[in-house]
Amino acid sequence: MRIGYQSLWASVGEIYETLAHTNILELNGVTGDFKRFTYGGPLGEAAVAGEVDTAVAADTPILRVIGRRADFKVINRTHDWVWYVMARPDIGVNSLADLKGKKLAAPFGTTVFPRTYRKLVDLGFREPFKEMTIINQDIAEQAAALQAKAVDAVVTWPPTSEKLRTSGVAKPIYTAKKGEGAGWQAVGPDVLKDRDLTVRYLKSYIMAVWWASNNLQTAGKWFGETSRIPPELLRTFAMDDRYLRAPVKDVREIDLVVTDADIADAQAVMDFLLEQKLLTSKVDVKSAVDMSYLRQAQEDIKAGKHPVLSSIRITKP
């Protein structure tokens, strides 16, 4: 399997690094070829082009992929996370309402951009693109752009947000509530055609969540090397995830289902994009999500039908 994941997304990078550095996939009879991307936009393009078999991103970019590749399906929730709008501290911007006339940068292919755009509309911005300057920018470029005063504010997420805050380059002017963004994983047709393989991959993912939860320092070290973010900062953001904030004793407790409420929330965002003419056609979120593979994987784990957890070994220090 060609497994795509993000090199700058905390609280999920640790899980993928666990899959890459241990024998968990091998124990489940899965071979993984890992491919890194800076954020969901380019990862989604790789999925559409058939260059990866799995894609992890927030709900909106994953659904954009499925809008172009209906043979991909969302198979699980990956993690909990929080996002931010942050502004330079020297320009007197203290809230979203203060962004009128300012220059805001956001990666357009993400979920944080339409969610921020929707909040601006709710605040009374009739046409945000006309009332402020909004530019599409990779998350990896945010620090340099703020330092150069090329932009006034950015829409961002951990660990980049913490790097901006601790360096004094930007301050939060909006912090999303937990649940305002979802991490989803989608899988393509070459995997889905083999139901047993899909289930075994999901069991691997669940086991990786359990292992990372119980070995967070090691998993954080690996992801710190990938993201170039100090592990102590990564541990701060692990607190946003329900399973990484403290060691999970029983792997059977891990539930990665995308709920009906998650689907409804994502549908509202996709409908908003369509209304604002930021999307060309309607996306039916419910039909894009298939939890049958995950439910089988979780039932197998609850029944003890999984590799012995004590057999997990580090294969790539």
Image (spheres, rainbow, N blue to C red):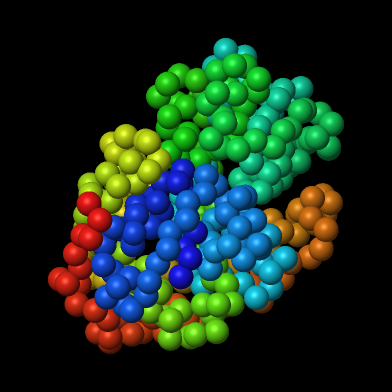
Identify which residue is drawn at 46% across, 70% down: 1
Say how many tags the image has.
0
Q: Residue at x 58, y 62 (%)?
A: 51
Let me know if residue 215 appears in the view. yes
Location of residue 135 with respect to 255 vertically, above or below: above
**Is 315 left, or right, of 127 in this rendering?**
left
Q: Is 140 situated left or right of 113 in this image?
A: left
Q: Position of residue 235 (x, y in %)?
A: 30, 42
Counting from the top left corner in percent of width and height, residue 85 is at 58, 34
Judge whether residue 115 can be spotted in this image. Answer: no
Q: Residue 136: percent from the left, percent from the top?
A: 69, 37
- Quadrant in the rendering for residue 150: top right
Residue shown at the point (61%, 58%) measured from the top left: 46
Query: Among all residues in the image, which is located at the extreme top?
Result: 90
Q: Residue at x 23, y 60 (%)?
A: 315
Residue 316's place in the image compared with 50, above or below, is: above
Observer-nearest residue: 286 or 208?
208
Percent from the top left, x then y, of residue 73? 59, 73
Residue 43 image-quadrant placement: bottom right
